[in-house]
Amino acid sequence: MNRPSTDISASSPPSFEVTDLYKSFDGETMVNDGISLRVEPGEVYGLLGPNGAGKTTLVKQIIGLLKPDSGSITLGGYDLVADPSHARQLCSLLPQAAMPIESFKSREAVDLAGQIRGGDRRGVRTRRRELFAALDLDEWSDTLGTNLSGGVRRLVGFVMTIVRPGPLVILDEPTNDVDPLRRRLLWEQIRRLGDTGAAVILVTHNVLEAEKSVDRLAIVDAGRIVAAGTPSSLKAGDRGHLRLQLMMTPGRPVPELPDFVESETLVGHTLATVVSERRTTDGIQWAQSLIDGGVAEEYALGATSLEDVYVRLTGHESVSV
């Protein structure tokens, strides 16, 4: 049996495809219910959905830890269901759980991961230095994993995953615990990873940040894909509408909403509403009256976002930025 190449520069990068995938744990409740998607080389593909939507179960099937009840998973000419060993060779995964690097210095953990995936020592070290500099990690290069904060450890795990990437890279909630500054740097590297030719699957429920980085995405809820396409195409149904967001005064009850508010989401003290462009003046006057009355502290008016689509389709709020 031929061993598949894990070097995305060795030949034309392959496409990744999932077709009619079904998976249940008790024979009745479908965790993945007929999922189909395709990710092209160089594409960052978002897999968005609330906790329990079936995203992590799908990832486990892709990398060969679970076998689907039916359906196919292929990467180029390789059948990842029939031979899950190919999945482990061809896929690079950043799992939700922290990488087990307690006994390694950060640079040692990355160098070891790169060499295990077939990189030569010099090339891996050069790439590790580039990534540490890009993510502002140099000061932790010689720090043991057990002494790293959760966010820095997450970033080191990300570098371990992409220092020698396979043709398919799966990033499961990559920004967990990462501070806002380095989170921006991380998103830049995710985008650049796609530019190298890898097919990237980004699993997240942080919709606001993902919208800026993905080429296409699928929104998953209750095991099914409820919408798929580019961020712009998914927001097409909200054209002619605006997002009116209010920061409510702590301790004050949310007022009754006027009839021109078409939808609303309350997260903490932030009330996000959607109004028709035709009612923009009414919306601004209403928001200003709340501020004048001490019910709200400020407001912002802007274009609707992918998060508005996400809330409408799933009934869930995304993670706060």
Image (cartoon, rainbow, N blue to C red):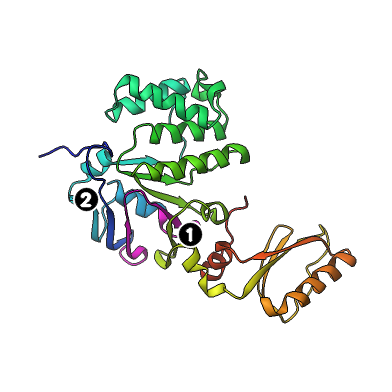
Residue to which mark 1 is pinned: 49
Under circle 2, the secondary element is: loop
Asked if residue 79 lies left or right of residue 295, the reply is: left
In the foreground, 319 or 280: 280
Instruction: Label 1: state its secondary structure.
Output: loop
How many numbered badges does the structure rendering display?
2
Q: Residue 197 sits in which quadrant?
A: top left
Question: Eyeballing the image, is 145 above or below 305?
Answer: above
Say whether residue 50 is magenta. yes
> In which image quadrant can residue 108 be found?
top left
Residue type marked 2: Gly
Q: Position of residue 192 (x, y in %)?
A: 44, 42
* Residue 139 placement: quadrant: top right
Position in image of residue 243 (x %, y %) = 66, 67
Q: Which residue is rendered at x = 42% and y = 26% of the image? A: 128
Q: Is residue 247 magenta?
A: no
User: Which quarter of the image is occupied by the N terminus?
Assistant: top left
Q: Pointer 2: what residue?
A: 76
Callouts 2 and 1 close, C-beta under 8 Å: no
x%, y% of residue 115? 31, 25
Give the magenta range: 27-55
Identify which residue is drawn at 69% across, 80% down: 278
Which residue occupies the extreme left position in the image?
1
Q: On the picture, is 190 further left or further right than 24? A: right
Mark 1 residue type: Gly
Measured Cα–Cα span from mark 2 to mark 1:
26 Å
In the rendered image, the vertical position of residue 233 relative to residue 185, given as above or below: below
Which one is nearer the viewer's eye here, 70 or 187?
A: 187
* Residue 96 visible in this rendered orientation of the protein: no
| The furthest residue to the bottom | 259
Res 289 label: none
User: Which residue does the image show at 27% across and 40% down from the upper left?
Assistant: 88
